[in-house]
Image (cartoon, coloured by chain):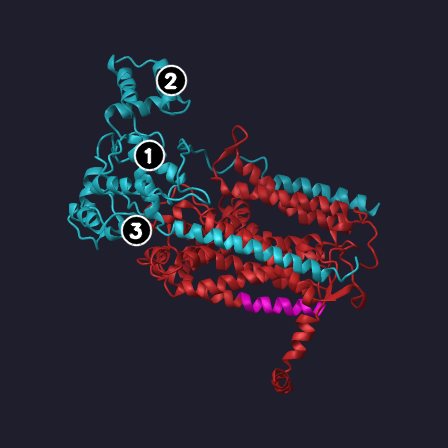
Amino acid sequence: MFKSIMEWVDARLPISDLIKSQATEYPTPKNLNYWWNFGSLALFVLIIQLATGIFLVMHYKPDAALAFDSVEHIMRDVNWGWLLRYLHANGATFFFVVVYIHILRGMYYGSYRSPREILWWIGIIIFFLLMGTAFMGYVLPWGQMSYWGAAVITNLMSAVPLVGEDLVVWVWGGFAVGDPTLNRFFSLHYLLPFVVFGAVFVHLWALHAVHSNNPDGIDIDEHKDSLPFHPYFTVKDLYGVGVFLIIYCGFVFFAPNYFAEPDNYIEANPMQTPAHIVPEWYFLPFYAILRSIDFLGSFSKLAGVLAMVGAIAILFVLPWLDRSPARSFRYRPLSRQLFWLFIIDCFILGWVGYNPADATVFGGMPIVFVGRAATLVYFGYFFLLWLITAFDIEKPKPTPTSI
Amino acid sequence: MKSWNGLKRWGGWLAAAITAVGLGLPPASALASGGVAPPKQDWTFSGVFGRFDEASLKRGAQVAVEVCMSCHSIKYIKFDHLRSFGFSEAEVKAMAESQGKTKKDKMISGMDPQAAKDSFGTIPPDLSLMTKARKGYEDYTYGILTGYLNDKEKEMVEKIFADGNVLDPEIKEAAEALHLGHDLEKAKKSLERIHRGDNFNKYFPGNFLAMPQPISAGQVTFADGKESSLEQMAKDVTSFLAWAAEPTAMERKSAGVKVIAYLVLLTIMLYAVKRRVWSRIPH
């Protein structure tokens, strides 16, 4: 019965072929480690965000006078509303945890290298979209940090030469962050996830054209060294989802406000600036880079914005900066050291971004000095990676010929 | 050799870059200062298995209605809602009526916001989310309620100014007791403000606030006969406000225990299946 129905469908739309070639029998390197789980995990979190978001919208009101109350209405009166909201808010946090690991995995095993450049680019575009979506989503509860975070970040556009000031007014829909801003952010916050979804489709399309990289970073003999995706990687990914859900739900049910700023439980008040405006944790390293450029007088703002955007945009040229004959850092001792230095540096930048701009550390040293040094190290990673590979300073260990 | 020449060339650029990045330049902004963190308290409702103590919530609700609501609203809670932790309908009705309200009304203070602004200089904040909306959470709320000067401390401050001769050792002693920091000039200014009658609190950022000491020992007579010391009242009303900030919190935690137990079991099974499937592959 089912077979004959499928035959009828396949004669008209070859679904079975597609499932076979692109899912169940899709050849996957057999030596992938658990760092390769984070791609499918990211898709899983995207689906959680879409599913919870669609239901939250049924109760949320994108109106400056009602938004804050409607969030509390969701928390208190809507059946399981607290669960929807905490899943969604912590989902954003875990989306970034998963995506950062996914990106760093690509950086460590050289997944950006030829022939995967376009796959890598689409990933960076998804990351930019994700940041925009998360930023606008954070504005929607209309708490103090929503409001003032939006004010600080949108204000950065005033750094654009000539049209900056007009641009900010245009984005705000007024002369300050207000009701029109909230409305358009809501509209875009609903739209962008579907754009992300489309980009994820192209990301997978590009992946299925070139197939997965692997921990050895070598081209494999697919007949000998790959496994069908199902059941080997479906079950491995599902196990990863299980571990992920335990950690994620641990926060959702027992520490749902762990990553939140208390100030965002105060309703937005345009007349009262909070003592200390901090973005969400996942923006902190980039926020630190932005604030580290404060020594160029009137050009500081523009330079800071360029540095902040450049910190991510530089990933676009990473495939050409890295000229090593080996893809994977497994066989590249010097690159590996740089990589771990880069990771530590990202945490330092995060810590700098979390502190007030005028804080002092280590007995009186302004923290911005740390920020500047860490910014230099951040960009230094890309420069040094190019330097040691372009001039053969790094001598990679021999890579295996098969996995 | 090619690489060495490259290094030398780029070494110069690197030095230039370090200078350009401004590691040697002074920062654009100056320094600010903070306050004292409130001490940590034990809350019956903290942790995975922690739950509200209903007797404490009832006492806390009594303090909230009889004292806090003179100025503050708790706008996300209706009187009727208080039945969820053990009040009877008659008790809830009586509490609402004491505020000139019915049980279906929200817990809105009788004080006119403009009148509050005239007498205190600010509109008293709504308390519904207070324990979630400040760094330190419940410890902060408790800290504020108990962080005003006690009689001994008041006496100490008055003694400094009594003889018209303010001595450095006196300031030092008081600064230490009230956590005013090491800057004696600043400490002296703070002590003068206390002497003039400004509201001082050890745990409020910046120390001075619009709210005079809101509760003191014996201010309410608890329905359950518990002694109404300052600490007891502060603890109970903070517990009540923690409930008010998220009435679904305990429902969340008990659901969480089941969810995590289920997920752990599921994940163990998925791991077993994974092992089984992958055992076909020779390594």
Amino acid type indicated by mark 2: Lys
Query: Is A116 left or right of A59, judged from the image as shown?
Result: right
Is there one chain holding both mark 2 and mark 1?
yes
Mark pair 2, 1: CA separation: 23 Å
- Of label 2 and label 3, which has the lower sequence position? 3
**Callout 2 crowding tier (Cα within 10 Å): few <14, some 14–19, many ≥20:** some
Number of callouts: 3
Q: Residue at x 35, y 62 (%)?
A: A61
Q: Nearer the viewer, residue A227 or B157?
A: A227
Q: Nearer the viewer, residue A229 or B158?
A: A229
Amino acid type indicated by mark 3: Ser
Q: Which residues are the magenta region?
A: A196-210
Q: Residue A66, percent across and down? A: 31, 58
Question: Dot 3 corresponds to which residue?
Answer: B84
Question: Dot 2 corresponds to which residue?
Answer: B172
Colour displayed for chain A in the image of the structure: red
Chain designation of label 1: B
Q: Secondary structure at mark 1?
A: helix
Query: Is B126 left or right of A312, judged from the image as shown?
Result: left
Q: Residue A220, percent across and down? A: 79, 63
Question: Dot 1 corresponds to which residue?
Answer: B144
Above/below status of A189 relative to A385: below
Q: Residue B177, percent across and down? A: 37, 21
Q: Is residue A263 magenta?
A: no
Chain designation of label 3: B
